[in-house]
Amino acid sequence: MLDPAVFVELKASGNLPSPRGSALKVLDLCQRDNLTLPELIQAVQVDPAMVGRLLKMANSAAFGRPRPVVALTPEVLMSIGIQSVRQLVLAFSLVSGNRQGQCAEFDYEAFWSRSAATGVAMQLLGAATRVAPPPELFTVGLLANVGRLALSAIHPLAYGKLLHQSGGRFGTGLTGLEEHTFGYSHVEVAAAMMHDWGLPRLFCDAVLRHEHAEGDVSSRDSRVAQLVSCLHLASRLAELCFLQGDERRAGFQELLPLARALDIADGNLALLGDQMLSEWKDWGQLLEIAVREVTPFSTLDTPAQPAGEPVGEYRKLSVLVIDEDTAAAERLKQLLEAGGHQVNLARGGHDGLVEVLDQQPQLVCVDLCADRDRGLELIRTLRQTELGRSVYLMVLTRPDDDERLTMALEAGADDYLDKPVVPKLLDARLRAGRRMIREQQLLRLEQETLRRRLLELAITSQHAREAALTDVLTGLYNRRHAVDRLKQEWAEADRGMRPLAVLMLDIDYFKAVNDSHGHDAGDEALRQVADVLRAISRMSDVVCRYGGEEFLVIAPDTSLDGALQLAERMRSAVAQRKLALATQTVKLTISLGVAVKGDGIASAERLLKAADEALYRAKQYGRNRVEHAA
């Protein structure tokens, strides 16, 4: 673990990656005891890209929604979880704000691409093992290697040399070089940063230990051990996305024992890997990072094709045999394993149902010979569950027992086999079963594609709504949004008995700029003044272009003294700024009027009018000054 004193020193350097922009307000809100969901939604919607990313998470397969959500609502946020929202916003902000740096040898794009793949893999593994909420696991995977980013920022030249020594590849070899050179490694820095950001201790411990994990979940009661194993496996899966050919195939085979230790069958790991590739592309688009074209994982464990079987149709299956006849079950298991399938056994009744839900096999063989009623009840119960509806069900019956077979098919069975099982007939039945399973997989992929397209439409719609409220020239909010937002802030200030201030400001002698330098120069002056206002304003302030050369700043939770100080900072910053217009530079000034909610101002409209009157006085008294409402 990193020495706390060393971390304090690293943090004091000001070079550690940190969240910024609108994310800071969201993070602050999530720590408040009196947070309301409408407040949180309002804070998130300032950043349309953030909205799209949260919607992507809400629509991920981990939540199993029957139809995609297209807007952030209190219900959607509650389903994700406030703690998960906070962690996701933190992660997304770090990605957006750290796409480049001073370390020439550090490939920032590849770093975030691999981190996104790890995050997606971690989320899917977490859903399969139920070790923690999927959104939080996405954040853990995405930030697991953020220590490398930190080291590239703190020691750009020295870390560049280490990357050169290691051939530019991340791995335990590079970790050893880090420890030898700096006295600490990237995992220690990452764990300390995540702890500083308020992530749970068990996540920080998993990040600290995951590189050297062997994938052995020795204690089923140890949640940290499972997290370590999941993160280790997720990192290795992500690494395979950047390998090719035999190296990638061999790497995948090495991961199979790690997956089995987490009760993930070989065939299911390949399917999980393919789902990771699909979602990795989606996250790449949302996070605006490059994602490679990668051959599906399901092709890496494909044995030789049986004669006469169509190419691409053969797949190993994960099979669960439910049979109270132990000897018969073992014989069937041997036949199935000879065909390359992953097979588990379970007794009938409740045990069989629990095993199906826990192992999530592709094919279930249910014996009806020993206890017909219990077998039929198991089939009916499975077909009533979401998972059970997607399982291929094969029943084992006695020859010529037409009544029992009919009841099984009516209960929901897909196919049958007579006992004792004939190997050739078993192979033929499995071939038909594989075709059905493959069709179900394709259908799920089509549904996921439709889900993604609907999400893209929702994000496009969100962008369109934001564009309608944004001034094209300056990128600030426009007058329409200013009026609506002021009403919202007034109502919240009224309910919470909190202060509220507005600043109305105007560029002095702006007409002279247009007349002397042209309208293009006037537009550039507006953009640069807007940049100054945006830089000086606080996270809670709402800066808008009100019209022409007029701007409006809404300052929640701000008293008169605070508003006057903010206005003076803005006035001074603009006056000191040399604006580059065409081939020359000019200096401009602004006049500001300040008004606060209080006696004599009983509405948002009156507050706006009071600020406008104060602005008029500032211009009357000589411009380049601040006046407040009487």
Image: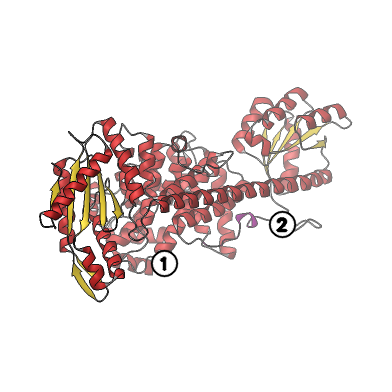
Q: Which residues are magenta?
A: 292-304
Q: Quadrant of the C terminus?
A: top left
Residue located 32% across and 62% down the image: 152
Percent coordinates x, y for residue 235 in the rendering? 47, 53
Amino acid type, callout 2: Gly
Circle 2 SS class = loop
Question: In which quadrant of the rendered view does residue 389 lie?
Answer: top right
Quick one: 432 or 71, which is closer to the camera? 71
| 113 displayed left or right of 529 | right
Residue 242, numbered label: none
| 531 displayed left or right of 219 | left
Question: In which quadrant of the rendered view does residue 474 lie?
Answer: bottom left
Percent coordinates x, y for residue 263 in the rendering? 57, 41
Amino acid type, callout 1: Gly
| 8 displayed left or right of 284 | left
* Disc 1 residue crowd, few under 14, some 14–19, many 20+, Cα 10 Å: some
| Residue at image mark 1 | 168
Q: Is residue 513 magenta?
A: no
Location of residue 488 with respect to 280 vertically, above or below: above
Marks 2 and 1, the one that precedes in the sequence = 1
Looking at the image, can residue 396 be seen? yes
Residue 312, numbered label: 2
Looking at the image, can residue 233 be seen? no
Percent coordinates x, y for residue 457 in the rendering? 53, 51
